[in-house]
Image (spheres, rainbow, N blue to C red):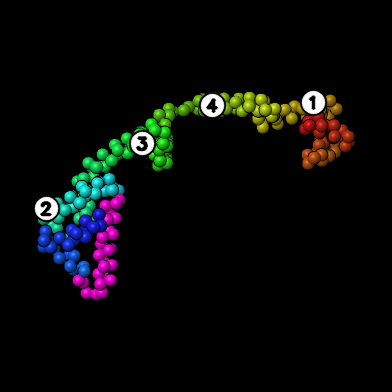
């Protein structure tokens, strides 16, 4: 593409009477400065051709479109980025569509031959699937959420039971400990006390246990927490 553009710049004098190439190459300054100025122009023009959406256009089609536009554009005054875009814009819709079909066919062909598709395609399909899923999710009521939560709790309980873990929820564990503590206190007549008089606090494994003596505290701890 760069060679074509250089040739076109040199031919502008004949085609449109433009001295753009000579103005650059014979500008005031050194030859190196002139070449640097030419390279900057060519880099910008080639860069446009290589970027989306123009990159889908075959080079031969690009060259013909630009060359024809140079001859036909009544407002032509030199090659620049805006002129290149204006020349190629009519081809974008044509070749972009063809490019899309070709990419799809290539991906299908790779899938059929066992060659994995590129990561970009995999990521795109994931995003597309997520978008479709979002559109198809029905509205959920509070009753539905409660039902889902209960089903999830039951599933976790069953999994815990099968692995020998304590399957009860935290709330159920606390209630069970309270019940066991109540039985332990009732068996010793401590539940009939209206205050803590006569009881002492004994710390066992970081837990405060109220009882009449250390031995009784140890027994209550074993009954309730072990």
Mark 4 to mark 2: distance in Å? 69 Å
Between marks 3 and 4, how big is the CA–CA gap? 39 Å
Circle 4 is placed at which residue position?
148
Q: Which residue is mark 2?
A: 72
Q: Earlier in the sequence, mark 1 or mark 2?
A: 2
For the record, the magenta segment spans 26-51
In primary-sequence order, the first of circles 3 and 4 is 3
Residue that appears at 19% across and 59% down: 7
Q: Earlier in the sequence, mark 4 or mark 1?
A: 4
Contact check, label 3 and label 4, Cβ < 8 Å: no
Q: Is residue 173 shown to the viewer in this render?
A: yes
- Residue 43, position in %: x, y? 28, 59
Element at label 3: helix
Q: CA distance from mark 4 to mark 1?
A: 35 Å
114 left or right, relative to 27: right
What element does badge 1 sit on? helix
Residue 36: percent from left, percent from top: 28, 67
Q: Which residue is mark 3?
A: 107
Q: Give neighbour class at mark 3: few <14, some 14-19, many 20+ (Cα, 10 Å).
A: some
The residue beneath circle 1 is 183
Q: CA distance from mark 1 to mark 2?
A: 101 Å
In magenta segment, residue 102? no
Q: How far, Cα to Cα, is label 1 from label 3?
A: 71 Å
Q: Secondary structure at mark 4?
A: helix
Q: Is residue 134 left or right of residue 16?
A: right
Question: In percent of the image, x 25 and y 65: which residue is there?
Answer: 38
Asked if the residues shown at circle 3 and circle 2 are in contact, with their CB atoms under 8 angstroms apart, the answer is no
From the viewer's perspective, is 204 left or right of 164?
right
Query: Considering only vertical position in the picture, is 204 above or below 185?
Result: below
Location of residue 22 in the rendering, given as x and y in whole percent from the top left corner: 17, 67
């Amino acid at each position: 593409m760069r060679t074509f553009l250089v040739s076109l710049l040199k031919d502008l004098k004949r085609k449109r009477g433009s001295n753009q190439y000579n103005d650059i190459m014979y500008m005031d300054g050194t030859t190196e400065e002139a070449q640097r100025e030419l390279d900057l122009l060519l880099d910008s023009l080639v860069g446009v051709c290589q970027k989306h959406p123009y990159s889908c256009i075959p080079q031969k089609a690009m060259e013909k479109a630009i060359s024809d536009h140079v001859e036909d554009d009544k407002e032509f005054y030199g090659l620049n980025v805006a002129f290149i875009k204006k020349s190629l814009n009519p081809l974008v819709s044509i070749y972009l569509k063809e490019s899309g079909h070709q990419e799809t066919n290539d991906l299908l062909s790779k899938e059929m031959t066992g060659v994995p598709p590129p990561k970009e395609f995999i990521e795109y399909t994931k995003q597309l699937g997520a978008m479709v899923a979002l559109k198809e999710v029905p509205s959920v009521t509070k009753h539905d959420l409660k039902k889902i939560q209960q089903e999830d709790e039951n599933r976790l309980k069953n999994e815990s039971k099968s692995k020998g873990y304590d399957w009860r929820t935290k709330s159920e564990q606390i209630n069970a400990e309270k019940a066991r503590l109540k039985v332990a206190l009732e068996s010793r007549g401590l539940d009939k006390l209206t205050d803590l008089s006569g009881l002492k606090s004994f710390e066992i494994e970081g837990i405060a246990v109220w009882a009449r003596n250390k031995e009784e505290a140890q027994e209550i701890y074993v009954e309730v927490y072990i």
